[in-house]
Amino acid sequence: MTRQWLKKRFTLCLYSSLAAISFAGFASAAEEPVRPNIVFIMADDLGYGDLGCYGQQMIKTPNIDRLASEGMRFTQAYAGGPVCTPSRSVLMTGLHNGHTVARDNVPHYSTYLQDDDTTLAEVLSGVGYRCGGVGKWSLGDANSVGRATNQGFDTWFGYLNQDHAHYYYPEYLDDDDERYELSGNSKSHHTYSHTELTERALRFIDESSDGKSPFFLYAAYTLPHFSSPKEDEDGLTVPSTEPYSERNWEAKAKKYAAMIHLLDQDVGRITKQIDELGMGDQTLIIFTSDNGGHKNVAKQFNTNGPLRGYKRDLTEGGIRVPLIARWPGQIPANRTSDEVIAFQDMMPTFAELAGATPPNHLDGISIVSGLRGGKLASDREYLYWDFGHCRTRYHQAVRWNDWKGIRSEIRLGVAGPIELYDLRHDLGEAHDVAADHPEVVQRIEQIMNTAVTPSEKYPIGKVYKGHAIWQPETVK
C-alpha cells in the first residue's frame, strides 16, 4: 500500500463527503434530484455505418435501433482515439488524447493507469455507486496498479490485457483478482467469451437491483473486433453465422454480420432486463463504439457509411462513432442530435448526474443539457486526437468549430502540411481547402503544437525500436 495510493483514496473520500453535503443541501431545497443508474455499452471496432439506425441496409440491428427510437441518436459523437487503448483511457480519465495517460496501443505496460490517475469509476464510487465492468479493459494487467479493481471498479470480468482480448475462445478470463478458467478452450472452441461477458453483466444488474445504491455498468464488449488468426483462418471467429448462413456472401462477411447480430441481441437482453426489473426510468443507457470500423470489413457493408477512412485513421471514419442514449422521461424519444460530443465528456456528464465532484482541469464538458434535447450548456474550444507515438509517422487532428485539420506527415521531427476540411459541407473529407483558409490552418496548427503535454510514459523525443519520435517543441 503506497503513500500515493493512500493519498488518492483520501482525496476521493473527501470528494465524496463534499459532494454528499452539496447533494443533500440541493435535495432539501428542492425536489430530490434523480441519480440514475448508468449503463455504458461499448462495441469494439463497430463502424459508424454498421447499425440500421445509422443507415446500414444489410445487417439487421433491431434492438439497438429500438434503443435509438426510445432515446437520442447522436450524429457527431467522437471516440477518444482511433484505436482501442487511448479511446478507453480518454473515457476513463476525461482527458483528451494529448493529455490522457494511455495515448496509443503500444507500448502497453509502461502506460497503464497509476495511483495518481483518477477514473470515472472512482468518481462514481466516491458517491456511493456500485461499479462493475465486463469486457476489454486495456489499462492495467492483473498484477498492476492499473487493474480495473484498483481503479474504482468493485468487480471486473473479462480481459485486462489488450492482446488477450484478441481471443474469443481464451483459456481463461480475468475475474476480479482471480482467473475464471475455460479449460475446454485449450483443445477446442468450447466457450465463446462474449456469451460469458453478457451473463456476468446481467448478473451484475440483477445483484444491483435492490435499490440500496445506484450502479454503473461498463460493458466494454469485444464484438465485432477481428480475432486472433490462430482461432480462424479468416481472421474472425463466431459460433455460428446465423442468421446470415444462407446469404451469398463470402465467409468473413457472414461472420462479421453474425457478430453484430450477437451484439444486438445482447444489447436487447440488457435493456429488457433493466425494464423488467422496473429500473427503466432510473437508468441511463448509452451505446457506442471505441473507434471507427476496420478496413478489412467486407466492402458491401460500407462499415463507416459516408465517412472517409477507418480505424487507425484520424479522418472521420477512424474517430466518429455511433452513440445512442436512452433514459425514459429524461431524454426525449426518437430524437437526433447534431451536438458535438466526445468520450472525454462522459466523466463530467456522469459526475453531474451522480452529484459527484470530478477532478479539476478535465478536457471534457458536461453534455447533460444535450441529452435532454437542448444545446450544450458549455462551449469547448476544440477537440484533439493524435496517433503514432511509437512509429515513424505521427498523426494529429483537430476539430475547431466545423473545421477539421489533419497533419499526417510528421516524420523524424519534420512536419508536413495540414489538410483542412469543412465538415459542415464536406462530411467525407474529400476536398482539402487549406489553401483557401490560411488563417484557419494557422489557428489549428497552434492548437496542435500546444494540445500535447509530453508524457514520460512514451519515448517522445527519444528512440523507440530504432525510430526517432516527434515532440511538439521540435517540429520544424
Image (cartoon, rainbow, N blue to C red):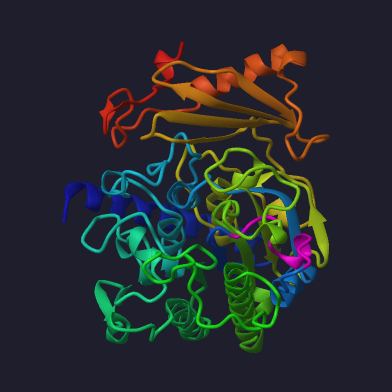
SS assignment for the magenta stretch, majority? loop
237 relative position to 303: left or right: left
- Observer-nearest of 357 and 303: 303
- From the top left corner, tell me how far across and down residue 367 is, in percent: 66, 50
| 183, above or below 2, in the image | below
Q: How many marks?
A: 0
- From the top left corner, tell me how far across and down residue 194 is, in percent: 47, 76
- Observer-nearest of 325 and 106: 106
Identify the image quadrant of residue 364.
top right
Identify the image quadrant of residue 190.
bottom left
- From the top left corner, tell me how far across and down residue 276 is, in percent: 65, 89
* Residue 227 painted magenta: no
| 135, above or below 13, in the image | below
Residue occupying the point 55% across, 48% down: 311
Residue occupying the point 16% across, 56% down: 1
Which segment is the magenta one? 46-57
204 relative position to 407: left or right: left
Residue occupying the point 36% across, 35% down: 390
300 relative position to 312: left or right: right
| 3, above or below 205, in the image | above
- From the top left corner, tell me how far across and down residue 33 is, in percent: 64, 65
431 relative position to 313: left or right: right
Residue 154 visible? The answer is no
* Residue 55 painted magenta: yes
